[in-house]
Amino acid sequence: MRKKWLEKVEYVCQETNDITGEKHKIVMFNGQNGDLYISTCPESYKFGTTVRIERSGGASTRNPRLVQALTATYDAIAENEDIYFNGIDITENTKQELEQLSCDGIGHSYDTTIEELIKFYKINN
């Protein structure tokens, strides 16, 4: 289960090139609209210039791998431990089945769409 989803998460860089010596951070949060917001700023700020990554169109259609990577980045900072498929939660049972496929040498790709996964289960079950 996700520990965090709508909460703001931050990662403070340990080194800085800032002439003031202040460390910088990445700030990320998921909006209730499903979009991901990313900001970089000095550690003492709440937010800086923010980029909105649209998960329902926009970035998700132009560059789905970017959306997946940034969602994984949020999960890493938030210390979420779930496995996701294109940013969508999957059940414990599905996680075990995917792990078994990987152990059987079949493997699975995070670039696979949910529809392809469903087709696979329909063909093989």
Image: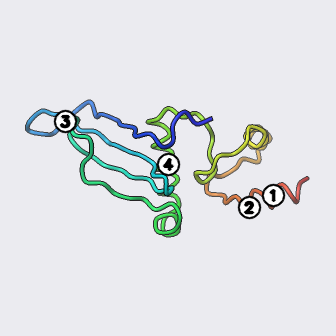
Whether 49 is drawn above or below 12: the answer is below
- Viewer-proximal residue, 88 or 70? 88
| Residue 117 position in % (x across, y down) | 75, 56
Instruction: Decide if residue 72 is on the left or right side of residue 97.
Output: left
Q: How crowded is mark 1: few (under 14 residues within 10 Å), some or many (20 or more)?
A: few
| Residue 96 position in % (x across, y down) | 76, 37
Residue 71: give its label: 4
What residue does disc 3 label?
Answer: 16
| Residue 59 position in % (x across, y down) | 46, 65
Which amino acid lies under the numbered mark 1 shown in the image of this protein?
Phe
Mark 2 or mark 4, which is nearer the start of the sequence? 4
Q: Do the residues labelled 1 and 2 touch (CB within 8 Å)?
A: yes
What residue is at 62 percent from the left and 46 percent from the top? 84
What residue does disc 1 label?
Answer: 120
Whether 65 is drawn above or below 1: the answer is below
What residue does disc 2 label?
Answer: 116
| Residue 122 position in % (x across, y down) | 87, 58
Mark 2 or mark 3, which is nearer the start of the sequence? 3
What residue is at 76 percent from the left and 48 percent from the top? 106
Q: Which of pointers 4 and 2 indicates the residue nearer the eye? A: 4
Q: Is mark 1 on a helix, strand or loop?
A: helix
Which quarter of the picture shows residue 19?
top left
Mark 3 or mark 1, which is nearer the start of the sequence? 3
Which quarter of the picture shows residue 2?
top right
Q: What element carries label 2?
A: helix
Q: What element carries label 3?
A: loop
Mark 4 or mark 1, which is nearer the start of the sequence? 4
Q: Do the residues labelled 1 and 3 touch (CB within 8 Å)?
A: no
Which amino acid lies under the numbered mark 2 shown in the image of this protein?
Glu
| Separation (CA) of disc 3 from disc 2 | 44 Å
